Image (tube, rainbow, N blue to C red):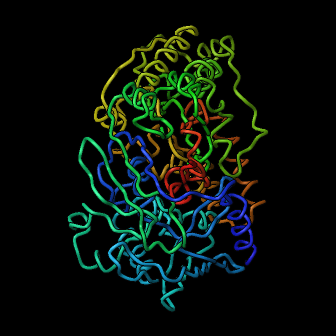
Amino acid sequence: MNRFLAAALAGFLAIGTASADPVAGGRANVVVQPEPPSLMMGLFQNAPTQMVAGNIYEGLLRYDNDLNPMPSLAKSWTVSEDGRTYTFNLEDGVKWHDGAPFSAADVVFSADVFLRQSHPRFRAVLTHVESITAPDDHTVVFQLKAPFGPFLNSFEVGSMPIVPKHIYEGTDFATNPANNKPIGTGPFKFAEWVKGSYILLEKNPDYWDEGKPYLDEIYWHVIPDAAARAVAYETGTVDILPGGAVENFDVPRLTALDNTCVTQKGWEFFSPQSWVWINNRQGPTANKEFRQAILYALDREFIKDVLWNGLGNVSNGPFAATTKFNDTDLAPYPFDPDKAKELVEASGYNGETLRLVPMPYGETWMRLAEVIKQNLADVGVNVDIVATDVAGWNQRLGDWDFDLSTTFLYQYGDPALGVARNYVSTNIAKGSPWNNVEGYSNPEVDALFEKGAATINPEERAALYKEVQAKLSEDVPVAWLLDLGFPTITRCNIKDLVTTGIGLNDGFKNAYIEN
């Protein structure tokens, strides 16, 4: 299937072309928050780790804003007609940051040994893989047990970071000293980390993609307070505010400043979607009509326009709009308090007080909890807000000790990778706030998701996912709120910073500062 390669190269040319001749030199001053727990991307995959370390490590592929695959460490690839054999041809002349040569053996070790042990999301992908082999130093072959539709979407740096075999083979991965000074193949090398203050990356002078990167350094500022991060941009201490770095109510003021540009691009691969977790196990929230009432009761346009300052869009269902196979014809749930009252009454609700545990990610999320409480009060539902910190929120959600909560989750471009995990019954397990926390179980939905993942024909997958979206929309296991917009705010003279659907996570490769 050489058409995959053709599409990839076309996407690369369309997105990777600079509007002017890039200028070499300079430092990018960027906010990172919260501070990453580690930069060893094979062991940690939280958002700040991916944002910083995605410029140290690399994956086999990148993805454009339409989620088409683009070359990275793999310069080309083919897929067999039966959808079971994926062959990747690797770039020549790639070196690790310590000078050791990169080869196919690193890819096999990373995927089949390191990540199988340490990376929960990629480990799930590997259940579909029969073997990973290296016929030569520049070729890697993945043989699948059966077709797996979204497999080609599994190779970006956060999903499958390539780690150095010569450093990690035969060691305790968690305690390897190299974790404190990560060594990748990427455009930037780790230089220094002063905990609580900054992380410094420096240009890789031996980078395989000739002429890149253009920047000399990336200086990541650790600034815990959102208001202080906004001030740091206003005063010129930082020049780049990644999505979510400041409170939404500060965005209009900051984007009105001179020499300031903003984009919501670079999040297409992640497709962050917010919703209200609804505990499906017991009490009023176990009733489908009651859950439908919640969705009718929520003024999601107000939430978008006032709390999120117009950033993002109201979700039409369980698939974010930028996720593959989103059904644009899915019947919406409009804001309809009268309909909500009818459904509350029909559900047999007796005035029980529901516990709402808001996501502790700043003032905007607390304001969201207050709006939810008021919207539900307006249709006769009693709600108490139970505020907690990040650790407490994780604990409550992981122990299912809630009635309602708020969250947002990444969808990773394909329903088999980032959507199904929230709704299939096999993913109901205590201890994590990122799986099927609501406890939803529908054998028909399970079967549809399983079949959708095992199908490679796009039209057939679209039909299966259309059916699954209709069933989820009927059952309302969670109350979908917004396809979130995360604005990246920068000085306008910083060019080509967001050139892929992964945004800043691999964006500094092409970035330069215009004089």
Taking 148 as reference, is 231 above or below it? above
250 on left or right of 321: left
Q: Quadrant of residue 356?
A: top left
10 on left or right of 183: right
How far from the left and from the top, in percent, is residue 88? 58, 79
Residue situated in front as seen by the camera: 161 or 417: 161
Q: How many marks?
A: 0
Taking 209 as reference, is 32 above or below it? above
How far from the left and from the top, in percent, is residue 371? 52, 15
| The N terminus sits in image quarter | bottom right
Residue visible at 68% across and 18% down in the picture:
335
Q: Quadrant of residue 481?
A: top right
Q: Residue furthest front?
A: 515
37 on left or right of 107: left
Residue visible at 53% across and 62% down in the picture:
156
**Does the rendering let one see residue 22?**
yes
**Does the rendering let one see residue 443?**
no
Residue situated in front as seen by the camera: 272 or 22: 22
How far from the left and from the top, in percent, is residue 244? 48, 35
Residue visible at 47% across and 37% down in the picture:
438
434 on left or right of 210: left
